[in-house]
Image (spheres, coloured by chain):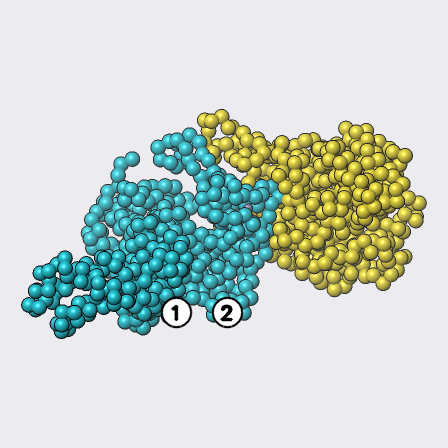
Chain colours: A cyan, B yellow
């Protein structure tokens, strides 16, 4: 296979106007599948989570999982969509071995949610650009099985020696969210695409309807892209790029396709309407199925399922209980807490916003809470390769430790040891303090003794301090802290030292 | 005694077992013996489960011995159409493509039969995937009509009807997509009921056309049909199209049999041209009997019934083309061309080429075409509109009448081979039964005599609104009782000894 010609991005954008369409498939995290009661856990032994229904055995019939309908409606509402008063499932007919019935139960011209939008902040070199992405529809469908093609060079079905199919994924509920053509993004098209998927992922996470893990395939993105000379021209022929499995890939795939299609058009060629596969490693797309003579899926209403007519009162109830839109919430908290964009970003990037909110709600100070969650705790989580949520430290623990510090019962160093104990499963902070004997030494007697000892060991210090070099006191404080294994209050040690020497401590 | 047991009704068998006059094992053995004696000639069965049947019978006998209460059909033998899954028992749907497949699960109907302690003798022959009116489209050869072994027993459920008519079983399960229970009942002199769509769960019924398929009872008497109907009906959460209403009081209605004051509508469009003279004659006599019994007979018109057959032969193939897509050799059943050389698409294609018969292929092609983009509106879309019009015709007719009646089939049983090469002639057998499936309401066929010109059974169809299945049993029982009084026995008693 010869590599496709690609022209530099800036040249491509100078000559063409890109139009994108993004189709995102979201695997819902319902406990059971869309049309049967099989579990949906990821990573189970192949073909261990199947039944006559999701294997499409003769005679088996689907029955809709109400939790999936609810999730679909909540997603639609969060994306400002209208919810259909009445809609149906449809069969999408095509033969493929990973599809047990050789049709996919999906929705066609009657999606459950339609006509929405998502406002996205796109970070660009020119600053934040606000873009409204229009959502055409969000519809329900079932996932297919997963084929593993063994042998051959490409890992694809053609040329493989044999194929294995795992039907555990078959029938897992999916929501497909389709945008209207995104026009006017110009040179920011790659960033717009990425920002949209990121914002969508954040909303889905806030709704708690999906794991939204792109690398595990619970959120999958297809990128449709076409070029035209000017925005006044009709839409060009588009390619549909699949297998785009990270936010970074979304951006790269858009950039690559713009360069590839521009090269084709510049050379007087034509863009073929086809499916293309994104290759993360090489950063290129390659041609898949050609869609010339467009595939005919022979859609028709699924006769095995009743139409869905969500009760409007129920829909309103779902709307009323939606979580706050993440972008709105972010803006509100930034104002309330007086955070800079940078501070808010690092909080979001650490994935700890909810933990900080919970810590504040439990009575903690937001600045101290942010310091704990994005600093020490994120570092420990990274070292251990776990999510900061899974450390075993709760917002209540953080609040308690902070209280102990402000009461003078702990200092920062001891507090870190308390955290270690909590993570090690030794109990809550008070239990760790008690069992490890971690308390600040507040009795002056032992401190004075330690100071005397330190002064004896460092006779030159007294002279320095008396001579005005007060920073020399650090040596003594350090030695005392060491002698008390950190359990002394450093400020108190310092005060006692100056007191003893009869020197007034400079402010 | 043995011979006698096979001639009893299901109700009488259940009573005899319950009273201890006979054991379920004796009853089962008598029927298995009868099958061994005659089925070589009738070919009603594709699979006989002696072992399972005797085990169920033994369990019923043990229950009785232990003094446990027995249900109204406990120990009664039954023949199951081979389109219903039954765990571990071959289910072929009359097709090569499912040869050797043993389902890993029970259909809801089978679950309910087991719960009722019904003894399932085996699986009965049918047109391949229920496509046909004669069983000639079975990949395993046709069944024969016990009234004349050279003739068809109807279809698609000809095996179930023949088994009952040949006294191989007192009860059978059929499925009816366009008449597959009623037309075989008509041509074999037995009773068959297509319940209201959604009345009996379709879970485990291998789908032909999902929006039309409905399982129902086959029996020799109206009361037996009601007992079986009551045993298998009722809501099933695994079938989304299953009704949540309580099961209509069909058994009570079958025991009432009173048509005084009942408004009976004669459907103008289901008579006249195309109907055999003897069929029309017997039908008219039955109308007179109903009048004598106190029914108020009126004529009704359902003008859109004329388009029913055309609409049916678009909707059915469209749904079937999709339902039958799963038979591809990948997960179960036949696999052809698996030489290690060919790709998956070729194996799928060769499997379907080898596994499906001509009629199935014909309908898959029609259905695929009817659903294709550019043709959908003109064919499938248009057919759905006709369906709505037919529903309106029924609604209007049921304003004037409590039940509607017509001959079940335009002719008596034809000869094997007579129509097999003429699909249109074959399709016309179902002209009177199809409207009910399109509208989703319910209907019964019961025997009303023999056509003078050929001495073969004629069936009368009673149609009732959706969810009013009890009306079928009430009217059917009244007519059955009057005819029995007239003849001194059931019509089926006149069938030749095999
Ligand atoms: Zn399942």
Residue extending farthest to the left is A467
Graded by Cα atoms within 10 Å as few (under 14), some (14 to 19) or many (20 or more), the crowding at tag 2 reads few
Residue drawn at x 80%, y 40% is B62
Residue drawn at x 74%, y 64% is B399
Q: Nearer the viewer, mark 1 or mark 2?
A: 1
Q: Is residue A213 above or below residue A408?
A: above
Graded by Cα atoms within 10 Å as few (under 14), some (14 to 19) or many (20 or more), the crowding at tag 1 reads some
In the displayed structure image, the side of residue B338 where residue B306 appears, left or right:
right
Q: Nearer the viewer, residue B481 or B305?
A: B481
Question: Residue B97: percent from the left, percent from the top?
Answer: 60, 34
Residue drawn at x 66%, y 52% is B236
Question: Residue B415: percent from the left, percent from the top?
Answer: 76, 34
Chain letter of mark 2 equals A
In the displayed structure image, the side of residue B481 where residue A313 appears, left or right:
left
Q: Quadrant of residue B327?
A: top right
Residue drawn at x 62%, y 43% is A59
**From this viewpoint, is residue B420 visible?**
no
Q: Quadrant of residue A212?
A: bottom left
> Which residue carries the number 2 mark?
A316
**From this viewpoint, is residue A248 visible?**
yes
Q: Quadrant of residue A495?
A: bottom left
Q: In the structure shown, which secondary structural element does the residue marked by tag 1 occupy?
A: helix
Q: Nearer the viewer, residue B112 or A96?
A: B112
On whether disc 1 and disc 2 are found on a single subunit, the reply is yes
> Which residue carries the number 1 mark?
A361
Q: Quadrant of the N terminus of chain A?
A: top left
Chain letter of mark 1 equals A
For disc 2, does the CB lie below 8 Å from ligand 1? no
């Amino acid at each position: 296979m010869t590599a496709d010609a690609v022209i530099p991005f800036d040249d491509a954008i100078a000559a063409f106007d890109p139009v994108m369409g993004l189709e995102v498939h979201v695997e819902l995290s319902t406990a059971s599948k869309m049309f049967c009661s099989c579990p949906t856990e990821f990573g189970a032994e192949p073909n261990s989570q199947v039944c006559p229904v999701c294997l499409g055995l003769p005679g088996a019939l689907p029955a809709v999982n109400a939790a999936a309908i609810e999730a679909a409606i909540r997603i639609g509402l969060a994306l400002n969509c209208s919810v259909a008063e009445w809609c149906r499932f449809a069969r999408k007919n095509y033969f493929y071995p990973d599809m047990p019935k050789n049709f996919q139960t999906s929705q066609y011209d009657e999606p459950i949610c339609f006509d929405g939008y998502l406002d996205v902040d796109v970070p660009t070199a020119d600053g934040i650009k606000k873009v409204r992405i229009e959502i055409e529809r969000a519809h329900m469908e079932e996932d297919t099985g997963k084929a593993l093609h063994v042998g051959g060079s490409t890992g694809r079905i053609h040329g493989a020696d044999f194929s294995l199919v795992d039907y555990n994924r078959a029938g897992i509920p999916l929501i497909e969210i389709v945008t209207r053509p995104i026009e006017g993004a110009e040179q920011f098209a790659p960033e717009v695409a990425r920002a949209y998927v990121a914002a969508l992922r954040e909303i889905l996470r806030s709704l708690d309807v999906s794991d939204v893990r792109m690398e595990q395939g619970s959120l999958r993105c297809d990128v449709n892209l076409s070029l035209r000379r000017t925005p006044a021209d009709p839409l060009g022929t588009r390619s549909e790029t699949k297998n785009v499995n990270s936010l970074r890939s979304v951006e790269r795939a858009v950039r690559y396709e713009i360069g590839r299609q521009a090269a084709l058009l510049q050379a007087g060629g034509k863009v073929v309407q086809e499916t293309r596969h994104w290759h993360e490693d090489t950063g290129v797309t390659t041609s898949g199925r050609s869609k010339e003579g467009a595939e005919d899926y022979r859609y028709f209403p699924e006769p095995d399922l009743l139409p869905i007519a969500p009760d409007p009162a129920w829909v309103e109830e779902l709307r009323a209980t939606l979580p706050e839109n993440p972008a709105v919430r972010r803006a509100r908290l930034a104002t309330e807490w007086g955070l800079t964009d940078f501070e808010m970003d690092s909080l979001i990037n650490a994935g700890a916003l909810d933990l900080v909110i919970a810590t504040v709600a439990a009575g903690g100070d937001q600045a101290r809470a942010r310091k704990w969650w994005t600093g020490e705790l994120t570092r420990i989580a990274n070292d251990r390769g776990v999510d900061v949520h899974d450390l075993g430290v709760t917002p209540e623990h953080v609040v308690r430790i902070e209280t102990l510090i402000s009461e003078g019962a702990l200092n920062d160093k001891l507090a870190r040891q308390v955290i270690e104990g909590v993570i090690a499963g030794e109990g809550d902070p008070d239990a760790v303090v008690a069992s490890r004997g971690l308390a600040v030494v507040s009795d002056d007697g032992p401190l004075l003794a330690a100071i005397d000892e330190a002064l004896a060991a460092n006779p030159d210090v007294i002279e320095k301090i008396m001579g005005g070099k007060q920073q020399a006191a650090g040596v003594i404080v350090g030695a005392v802290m060491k002698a008390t294994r950190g359990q002394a209050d450093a400020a108190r040690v310092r005060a006692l030292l100056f007191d003893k020497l009869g020197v007034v401590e400079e402010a | 005694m043995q011979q006698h047991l096979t001639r009893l009704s299901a109700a009488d068998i259940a009573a005899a077992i319950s009273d201890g006059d006979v054991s379920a094992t004796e009853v089962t053995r008598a029927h298995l013996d009868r099958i061994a004696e005659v089925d070589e000639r009738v070919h009603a069965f594709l699979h006989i489960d002696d072992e399972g049947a005797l085990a169920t019978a033994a369990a019923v006998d043990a229950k009785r011995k232990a003094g446990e209460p027995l249900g109204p059909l406990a120990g009664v033998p039954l023949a199951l159409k081979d389109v219903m899954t039954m765990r571990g028992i071959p289910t072929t749907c009359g097709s090569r493509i499912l040869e050797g497949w043993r389902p890993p699960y029970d259909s809801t109907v089978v679950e309910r039969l087991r719960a009722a302690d019904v003894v399932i003798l085996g699986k009965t022959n049918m047109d391949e995937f229920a496509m046909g009116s004669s069983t000639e489209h079975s990949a395993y050869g046709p069944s024969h009509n016990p009234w004349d072994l050279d003739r068809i027993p109807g279809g698609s459920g000809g095996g179930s009807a023949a088994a009952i008519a040949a006294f191989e079983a007192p009860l059978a399960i059929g499925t009816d997509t366009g008449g597959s229970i009623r037309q075989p009942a008509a041509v074999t002199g037995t009773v068959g009921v297509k319940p209201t769509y959604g009345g009996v769960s379709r879970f485990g019924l291998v789908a032909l056309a999902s929006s039309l398929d409905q399982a129902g009872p086959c029996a020799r008497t109206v009361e037996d049909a009601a007992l079986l109907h009551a045993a298998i009906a009722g809501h099933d959460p695994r079938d989304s199209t299953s009704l949540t209403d309580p099961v209509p009081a069909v058994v009570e209605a079958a025991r009432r049999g009173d048509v005084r004051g009942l408004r009976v509508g004669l459907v103008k469009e289901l008579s006249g041209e195309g109907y055999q003279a003897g069929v029309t004659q017997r039908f008219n006599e039955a109308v007179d009997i109903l009048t004598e019994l106190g029914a108020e007979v009126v004529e009704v018109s359902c003008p859109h019934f004329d388009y029913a057959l055309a609409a049916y032969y678009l909707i059915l193939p469209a749904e079937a083309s999709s339902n039958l897509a799963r038979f591809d050799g990948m997960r179960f059943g036949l696999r052809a061309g698996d030489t290690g050389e060919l790709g998956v698409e070729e194996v799928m294609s060769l499997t379907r080429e080898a596994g499906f018969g001509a009629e199935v292929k014909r309908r898959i092609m029609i259905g695929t075409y009817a659903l294709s983009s550019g043709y959908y509106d003109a064919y499938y879309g248009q057919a759905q509109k006709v369906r709505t019009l037919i529903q309106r015709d029924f609604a209007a007719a049921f304003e004037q009448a409590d039940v509607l009646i017509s001959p079940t089939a335009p002719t008596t049983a034809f000869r094997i081979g007579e129509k097999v090469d003429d699909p249109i002639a074959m399709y016309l057998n179902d002209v009177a039964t199809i409207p009910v499936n399109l509208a989703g309401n319910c209907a019964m066929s019961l025997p009303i005599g023999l056509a003078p010109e050929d001495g073969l059974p004629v069936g009368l169809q009673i149609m009732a609104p959706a969810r009013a299945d009890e009306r079928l049993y009430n009217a059917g029982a009244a007519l059955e009782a009057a005819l029995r009084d007239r003849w001194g026995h059931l019509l089926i008693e006149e069938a030749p000894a095999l």
